[in-house]
Image (spheres, helix red, strand yellow):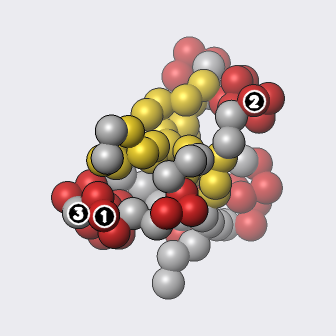
Amino acid sequence: MEILLEMGKINRSLHRDSEIVKHWIVSPPTYPQEFRSKKLVLWKTASNEGGVPFVTCLVWKDGRVAFEDVWLGDVWCDQKLNAVVEVA
């Protein structure tokens, strides 16, 4: 995450209020097939409350797109992530 901050890309990453994210939430069939088996990281939602780093991800559950908060300590070990840094 630090490299994204240094490069200034965090401000161009997806977040809960991104138009495309809102669209995927209300129209699940438009959610890209290649993301459905992964967690799509919304880097702009990253927080470090109480010294514990969390980020919100989009996940495909039961035919819909949902938000899931993920502890970054776990993410890099065994979870499938897909990070989209910029959306045109």
- Mark 2: amino acid: Asp
Quick check: marks 1 and 3 in contact, CB under 8 Å?
A: yes
Identified at 64% across, 54% down, the residue is: 82
Q: From mark 1 to mark 3, how far is it between C-alphas?
A: 6 Å
Q: Position of residue 22 (x, y in %)?
A: 27, 61
Label 2 SS:
helix
Is the residue marked by circle 3 packed among few (<14), some (14-19), or many (20+) residues within 10 Å?
A: few
- Mark 1: amino acid: Pro
Mark 1 highlights which residue? 29
N-terminal-most mark, 2 or 3: 3
In this orientation, does residue 1 appear? yes
Say above or below: 62 vs 19: above
Identified at 38% across, 39% down, the residue is: 61
Say above or below: 9 vs 44: below
Label 3 SS:
loop
Identified at 76% across, 48% down, the residue is: 2
Q: From mark 2 to mark 1, how far is it between C-alphas?
A: 27 Å
Quick check: marks 2 and 1 in contact, CB under 8 Å?
A: no
Identified at 62% across, 19% down, the residue is: 52
Camera-side residue: 51 or 15? Answer: 15
